[in-house]
Amino acid sequence: MKLESLTTHSPSETKKLAASLAKEWKEKARDRGLLIGLEGDLGAGKTTFVKGLAKSFGLVEEDISSPTFTLVNEYGDLVHVDLYRLEKTQDVAGLALEEYLQPGKIVLVEWPERDPFLMKQLQLLIKIKLVSKDQRQIEIMPLC
């Protein structure tokens, strides 16, 4: 897989893009899980992206919320993590994210840059940039 740079023009398009990646990512996750980082400013569309992916797991979009305060939301084989409120690497280590990374599971981590060690563990990095009110530039980078 190579670097992909895509543009979406609405939250609906962002969700559709994420859903279209689900089959490939589920296959990659089959043997050892898949750890994906989500970078982007507040309001860029990280959780919107997760909602699109969640639909391919048979989840209802309204049940997906940002784990800003809970830090981790587990939805069966989809795990959504938000490190925004964490400041120290030790805080991230305390979440024991490696325990969530199991065969068949996809772990999506918002604000992975909060922990340099975690950044080295990512298999994919999704960068979402808000270009305008509805337009997002989404880069998908394979890391290992």
Image (tube, helix red, strand yellow):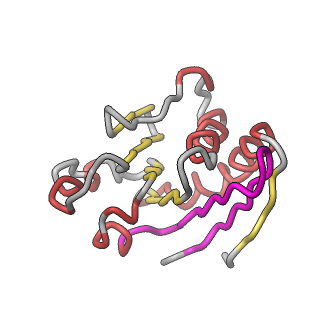
Q: Is residue 127 one of those drawn in magenta?
A: yes
The answer to whether residue 11 is magenta is: no
Decide which of 122, 27 is in the foreground and name it: 122
Q: In the figure, 2 relative to 135: above or below? A: below
Q: Where is residue 85 in the image (x, y as percent from the top left)?
A: 31, 46
Residue sitting at x 63%, y 39% = 48
**Residue placed at 43% from the left, 33% from the top?**
76
Decide: is 40 above or below 124. above
Residue nearest the viewer, comparing 87 with 144: 87
The x, y position of residue 97, in whole percent, is 28, 52
The magenta region covers 121-142
Query: Residue 60's x, y, as percent?
Result: 61, 22
Q: Main secondary structure of the magenta part?
A: strand
Q: Which residue is drawn at 44% across and 47% down?
A: 105
State the count of labels.
0
Residue 72 position in % (x across, y down): 34, 38
Answer with the quarter of the image where residue 114 lies: bottom left
Residue located 53% across and 22% down the image: 63
